[in-house]
Image: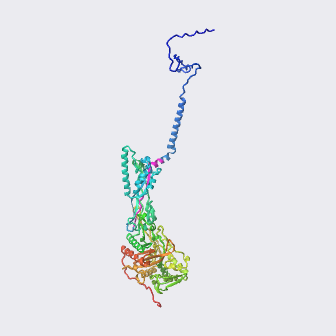
Amino acid sequence: MPSKEPPRRRVPGPARSRNAAGGSGRPRPAARPDPRRPGRPVARKRRGGSSRSIRLGSPRPRLRLISLCLTLVMLAFVIRLLQVQAVDASTYAAKAEKNRYLEYTIAAERGEITDRSGIALATSVDAHDITADPKLFTPEDSKAPDAPQQAAALLAPILGKDEAELAKKLSTPKSRYTVLARRQTPQVWKQIKDLKSVFAEKAAEDKAKGGPGSNVLAGVLQEPTTKRVYPNGDLAAGILGFVNAEGKGGGGLEAQLNKQLQGEDGKIRYAQAGGRPVPTAGSTEIPAVAGTDVELTIDRDIQWAAQRAIADQVEKSEADRGYVVVQNTRTGEVLAMANAPGYDPNDLAQSNSAALGNAALQDVYEPGSTSKVMSMAAVLEEGAATPGTHVTVPNRLHRGDRLFRDDIDHPTWYLTLNGVLAKSSNIGTILATGQLGKTQAEANKVLHSYLRKFGIGSTTGLDYPGESPGILAKPQDWSTSQQYTIPFGQGLSLNAMQAASVYSTIANGGVRIEPTLVRGTKGADGRYTASEAPERTRVVSEKTADTLAKMLESVVDDREGTGTKAHIQGYRVAGKTGTANRVDPVRGIYKGYTASFAGFAPADDPQITVYCAIQNPTKGSYFGGQICGPIYKKVMEFALKTLQTPPSGSDPARLPVSFKPGE
C-alpha cells in the first residue's frame, strides 16, 4: 500500500501581494509547452474546474473570401472592358465621335436673278446663322446657374428675338446644336463677337483671382451663309417672289426656279473642345456648288415706268389694284409685268399679305370690251363680214331673256363693222357674231373655238406658281344670257397676261407665241444657256390680223373712237378700251367695274404690246379709255424710246366708221 506523502511544510517568508489579475499574490507557475502544438504553451487549468484550450482563428478563410471578392470585381471589369472595346465598340465610338465632332452645312450661294441687261434684281450677300451649343450653358460648363437666361437677355435686343424663346433654346443640354437666328448681317455677328470678347476677358480675370470664371456667351457660335436681297426694293417683286426663312423660294420665280437657283449645299466636319475647333484633329469638307444665275426677259427701266404709272393711277382712282403687262410682239418676251399695290421682298414683315403674289397672272376677271377683238377676229376669219359691212345698231336689243344696251343711250347707229369696234358697241358685236353660224348654237361653237385658240381657258405657258387659266365654259354649257354676253367680254374670265397675249397675237400677224420670262441661265461653270424657243401657234391668217390692226387704229385715231387718250405723236397706235362689270371676289356679286386698255405700236410695224387693267376704281372715271388709256400712253411712249423704235413712216388707214342709211 503506497505511503502517503507527508504534507509540505510552509517555509516562512515575506508576504506577497496579489497580482494585477486579482490573484492571491502567489506567483503563477510557468506555462508548460504543449506537445501537440510545438511552440505554443499549454493552457493552465482554471481553479476549481477542468482545463480548456484557447485556440486562435485561422486567417485562411478570410483570405479566401477576399480573394473571391477581388476576383469577381476584376471579372466585372474584364467583362465591361470586353463589352466596351469589342462587343459595343462601334456604338461607343460613334457616341464619342458625335460628342467630339461637329458637322454643319455650308450653304450654297443662291444664283442671281438679273434683267435682260444683266442688272441684278435679286442677289445674295454674306450673312451668318447665329447658333449655340446648349451644353455649354449648363451650370457645370458655364459656371453660372442661370446662363441661358443671362445670354438670352443679352442676345434678344441684338437678334430682334423674344428673350423667353432664346432662353428655352439654350436650356436643352441634351442637344449640342440649336439655331438662334438665321441669315443675320455681318454687323449683327460683329456685335455678338464683341460681347463674347468682353465676357471672355472678364472670365479670365475672375479665374485668375480664384473665382469660377463664368462666361455665359462662350457657347454662342456662328455659321457662314448668305442672305437674299433685292437691290431695287419693290421693283418687279410680283415676278421675283421672295425667299423664306429657310432660304428656299417662297413665291414667284424664286419658288418656280428654286432648284436651279439654290445650288447644292456643302458640309464641313471638325473636332471641337469647348465649342472651339481643334486644329490638330483635322476636318473634312465637301464644298458647296453655287446656284445657277437666271437672266430674265424683263427690262428694268420699262418695269420701273410701268410700275410707277399703275401705282399712281390706282392711288388716284382709289382702286383695289391694277396691273400692266408689256410684251415684245415678235418674240413673246415679257418686258414688264407690274402690279399695284406691291410689296418689298426685303421686308416681308411690313408687307400686306394681300399684295403678295403676282396678280397679273393670278387674278381672273371678266375683261369687257378688250375681248371684242377676238370676236371680230372670228367674224373676219370666217368671212361672215368685212370691216365695211353695215351694221344697224338700235338703242336696245332683245335677245334670250335679256334686253341689251350699250354703255350710253343713243339713237340708232349706222355703223360699219369697223365702227362697231371703234365705238365699242355691245349690240353691234352681238349682231356681228350671230353671223358665225346658221343657228345661235353653231355660232357659239365657232366663237368658242377661236377663244380657245387665243389661249382663253388655258395657262399662258409660263408655268408660274399660282397662275390661273381663267374661266371659259364649253359652248353647250353657256346660259341663255352668256350666248350674247361672251362676244363682248362678259361671262368669261382671264388674267392680264392672257389679255396681253391676245393683242400680241394680232400684232404678230395672227401667230400666238407663248410668253416667256426667262431669257437664259448661267451655271456655276460660267456657261450661258439660252432658253428654248417658245411654242408658236397660228390663230388667224396674216390678212385677218392686218385687217384687225387697221380696225384697232380707228379706236385710237378716229375722233369717234373710245381710245383717243392713248394717241402717241409720231406713232400709229392700235388699241381697244374695256369697261366691264366686276364680280366682287368676296361677296360673289357684280359690284364696281374693271377698266382696261390694250394695244400695240407702231401699228404699221408692231413691236410692243401694252395691256393695263384697274380693278374697282371708286374715284373719278371708271371707263377704260379715260383711266387706262393714259397709262397705256405713258408706258408705251417710254418703251418705244427705251427700245429706240423708229416712228411710223405712214399715215393710218382710217377705215370708215359709219354709213348713211340707204347707201
Examine the rendering and report whether any part of residue 380 can be seen.
Answer: yes
Is 421 located above or below residue 299 in the figure?
below
Q: Which of the pair 556/398 is nearer the observer?
A: 398
Q: Is residue 496 magenta?
A: no
Say if residue 329 shows up in the picture.
no
Q: Which region shows up in magenta?
A: 95-114
Relative to residue 474, is residue 201 drawn left or right? left
Task: Indicate whether 423 appears above or below 59.
Answer: below
What quarter of the picture does the N terminus occupy? top right
Could you say where residue 20 lies in the image, as x and y percent from the top left?
A: 50, 20
Q: Nearer the viewer, residue 92 or 361?
A: 361
Q: Is 404 in front, or is 514?
A: 404
- From the top left corner, tell me how far across and down residue 373 is, in percent: 46, 79
Q: Position of residue 45 (x, y in %)?
A: 57, 19
Q: Which residue is painted at 54% across and 31% down in the image?
A: 64
* Residue 108 lies within the magenta run: yes
**Which of the 4 image quarters holds residue 597?**
bottom left
In the figure, 291 relative to 70: above or below?
below
> Farthest residue in the bottom direction?
662
Residue 605 or residue 447, whichever sits in front: 447
